Amino acid sequence: MIKPLILIVDDDEIIRSSVIHILGEKYDFIEADDFESGIRAYSGNDISLSILDIEFEKSKNGIDLLKEIKKADSQAHVIMLSSFTDIGRAITSMKNGASDYIPKTSESIEQELGFRIEQILERDMESRALRSSANFQCENNMLVFGSDKLKTIFEEIKSVGNIRILIEGETGTGKTPVAIYANSVLSEKGKRPFVSINCAGLTKERFQDQMFGHKKGAYTGSVNDIPGLVELAKGGDLFLDEIGDLAPDCQAELLTFLDNGEFRRLGDPVTRRSDCRIIAATNVNLKERVQEGRFRKDLYSRLQQCRIYIPPLRERKEDIRPVMEHYIRFYCGYPKPYREGIYDLYHGFDWEEGNVRELRDAVHYMCQKARNSDVIELEHVNSNYSPGYASEKSVNEAVSDGQIVLKDLGDRVRENGFENYMSLVEREVLLKLCADQKSSRSLAGSINISSATLHRKLRKHNIRILKI
């Protein structure tokens, strides 16, 4: 795994060595001892974070270097070190874009530097991961598509400008890439901030800390002032994924911020402001959650200044070929030829569980199987998407009175392939369960899954229950 590369600029070799020793083996390092060598090192390398001394003896100081780094990349992460505990220097550093300011005492460096770097890079990694994942489904921040439905979505995003967006759609339809696209259309040279948080499972305290940050001493272990995501996203976009799973008390905190853009860090009486735009995404029906009392109606209203619904892949099958060919080119490194029957298989599949993400994974599997072949053949397709390869009889024999018989299971799995075998087992189990139920609702309750999940599975296996 490639380690983050940290630039250390200090004219004291002992300090540079001490910092490297303290940070250990988690990072790679490049060193410089003055302004000029620092600029060269930053320009010639992919730096994840810079640690700058404020005072240099023989050249421009660290503030000058900070300004040059931020001029080159406004999103660059920079921590300033100083031999003096001077609030004026700290303020100057932060005004010029520094992520933090730490005194050069051994205690401060040992206790705070490593922790602060982890905090900065952890948040940066999530944003980078989002942008990287978008590259699987995007070209130049554009989703791969062939349908008018998606074209209309992109045109609407371009036209609405800088207003809140609520993106709805099933898992795997491309909500995150659409959010990144919405960020990119307002971003000059990719400089508009884009940060994110997954709302599922957050407690009120965790949500407050992540969103609004905290002041040093706010709670045990808070050894430094930490800005929240709304500050990091200032002037850009904050992406709230899985907003439908946000806890009720967290919904109240978010609503307050949306009303006036004001917030306070935990433990800090100072009121701050952020003009970040909120882009939210959900794979659940928020209207239903509002009716059930699980999501605030006023919050739902504020989030959907622009509501975007991404239809599932089964409703825009004209996108299957361009998406498939994009991933073939991505995973093979060139547009490798394929048998037309492969497209026919994929076009006939409903993709109800994973949509575009599932199609991506299916193509990845297929390309791996075909890596030593000149042409992608039908035999390279995962048998889960090619029913003709499986023996349903072997599965029927393996299901008896609702129990899967384990005798000779290994042979059956090897014969049919694991994914295909499990899909057929699921079908037979559902058929057995459906025979004992009067409605899909009662069946969903009896096996402890949601009605929506059950309906998707029934459609996938072409199973019908007479009473719904």
Image (spheres, rainbow, N blue to C red):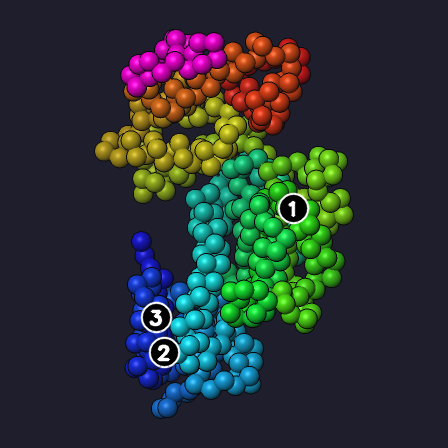
Instruction: Please give the residue where the numbered disc 3 appears in the rendered image.
Output: 22
In this view, the residue in front, 258 or 67, is 258
Q: In which image quadrant can residue 244 be found?
A: top right
Above-or-below relation of 21 to 429: below
Q: In which image quadrant can residue 274 be found?
A: bottom right
Q: Residue at x 24, y 31 (%)?
A: 373
Q: Position of residue 66 (x, y in %)?
A: 46, 77
| Residue type highlighted by circle 2 | Val
Q: How far apart are the alpha carbons under marks 1 and 3?
A: 39 Å
Judged by depth in the image, the label closer to the viewer, 2 or 1, is 1
Q: Residues within 10 Å of mark 3 (few under 14, many from 20)?
A: some
| Residue type highlighted by circle 1 | Ala
Closer to the chain start, of discs 2 and 1, is 2
* Disc marking residue 9: 2
Q: Is residue 139 visible?
A: no
Above-or-below relation of 109 to 3: below
Label 1: element kind? loop
The part of the chain drawn in magenta is 391-411
Above-or-below relation of 440 to 137: above
Q: Is residue 397 magenta?
A: yes
